[in-house]
Image (cartoon, helix red, strand yellow):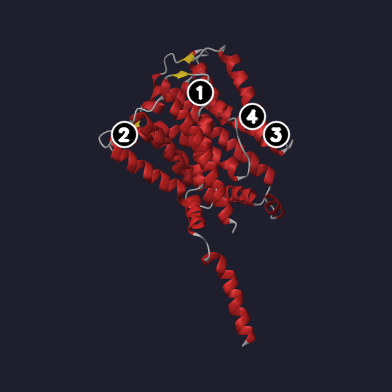
Amino acid sequence: MTQTTTSTAAGAAVAEPVSARSPGKVALAVAGKYGTIIGLAVMIVALSIAAPGTFLSVSNFTNVLTQNSLIAIVACGLTLPLVVGEFDLSIGYQASFAGVLCVGLMSDQGQPLWLAVVVGLLVGVVAGLVNGLLVTVLDVNALIATLGIGTVIVGVNYAYTGGIPKTLVGHPHFLDLALGKVAGIPNPIVFMALAVGLLWLLLNRTVLGQQMQAVGGNAEAARLSGVRVQRVRVWAFVIAGLMAAVGGVLLSSRVGSGQLTAGDAYLLNSFAAVFLGSAALRDGEFHILGTLIGVLTVGFGYNGLAILGAPTFFQYIFSGGLLVVAVALSTVARRYARR
């Protein structure tokens, strides 16, 4: 009898914290896991009511997907360093230089389209490799290393261009990369779908992806399990650099020139999307599907501001505020996931 009573009391003690959770704590837990999805749904409903003829249309939704497809590619690439517990502050600068170099090689050096694109993509691969080696081999803090490399890339960019944007001369097929369509679907959406799908498969269905998640969860435990932690981290930076370069090349194709700072804005928007995405479906974990949801949240927010005629300065307020909210949601999700 005593043993039964003791067991019952122990069970009640364990169950009590769950049942005694206040409505406020339950709301925070829900916000931490589903906040981004709820916010996106509320935003779409509110904008549909405020501007039904303009916002709620197939053409506008297609436009939002097209305009944010390149950010989605860059942000999904950024997800991988964050999965392994690192940061990359150079992705925007990588995107800018990749696009400038690609256009310059075709217009100034007379190189063929395929070679210019390959070299542009290699910019991201090399920058990502350097970032990874600095962080893993030299043990430089990722924030310092990537910010430093990003600043170097800015300098190289200005040295190559002399501070003057590169205008595309000839090569009309280059414009088709971002302006063409496949079966009526704009190419940027096709590229986004391919990038998101491949990165999702990499992170969730390959050995490298499982190792990335293991390293991000507990690097020391992963090392003791035989995972080559440094190599995995380097791969995360390399893939992030490649995706940044893809976004930069496609951006230059969209605008028809190589602008020195065209891709810089991808940095803030990508971080906002990734952190928003970590509060979608999972308890504060960075994942590809969540990042896509975060991108759509940012994209529909900007689209709604434009439709409602909000002043330009408010976009910066929205973007910065969204990043703060995203990090807060991610922190809340992780806190409740540990309980």
In the rendered image, the residue lying farthest to the bottom is 1
State which tag comes first along the sequence, 2 or 4. Answer: 2
The residue where tag 1 is placed is 99
CA–CA distance in space, label 3 to label 4: 12 Å
The total of numbered circles placed on residues is 4
The residue where tag 4 is placed is 147
Residue 218's tag is: none
Which quadrant of the rendered structure holds the N terminus?
A: bottom right
For the residue pair 45 and 265, the one nearer the viewer reads as: 45
SS for dot 4 = helix
Position of residue 16 measured from the top left corner of the image (x, y, whole percent):
56, 68
CA–CA distance in space, label 2 to label 1: 27 Å
Contact flag, marks 1 and 3 (Cβ < 8 Å): no
Residue type at the position of mark 2: Asn
CA–CA distance in space, label 2 to label 3: 43 Å
Name the residue rendered at 25%, 35% in the picture.
53
Q: Which of marks 3 and 4 is in front?
A: 4
State which tag comes first along the sequence, 1 or 3. Answer: 1
SS for dot 2 = helix
State which tag comes first along the sequence, 2 or 1. Answer: 2
Q: Is residue 165 depicted above or below 244 in this figure?
A: above
The residue where tag 2 is placed is 60
Crowding at dot 2, Cα within 10 Å, few <14 / some 14-19 / many 20+, comes out as some
Name the residue rendered at 33%, 30% in the picture.
307
Residue type at the position of mark 1: Gly
Instruction: Please indicate, yes or no, whether residue 174 appears anywhere in the rendered image.
Output: no
Q: Is residue 173 depicted above or below 290 in this figure?
A: above
For the residue pair 276 and 186, the one nearer the viewer reads as: 276
State which tag comes first along the sequence, 2 or 3. Answer: 2
The residue where tag 3 is placed is 134
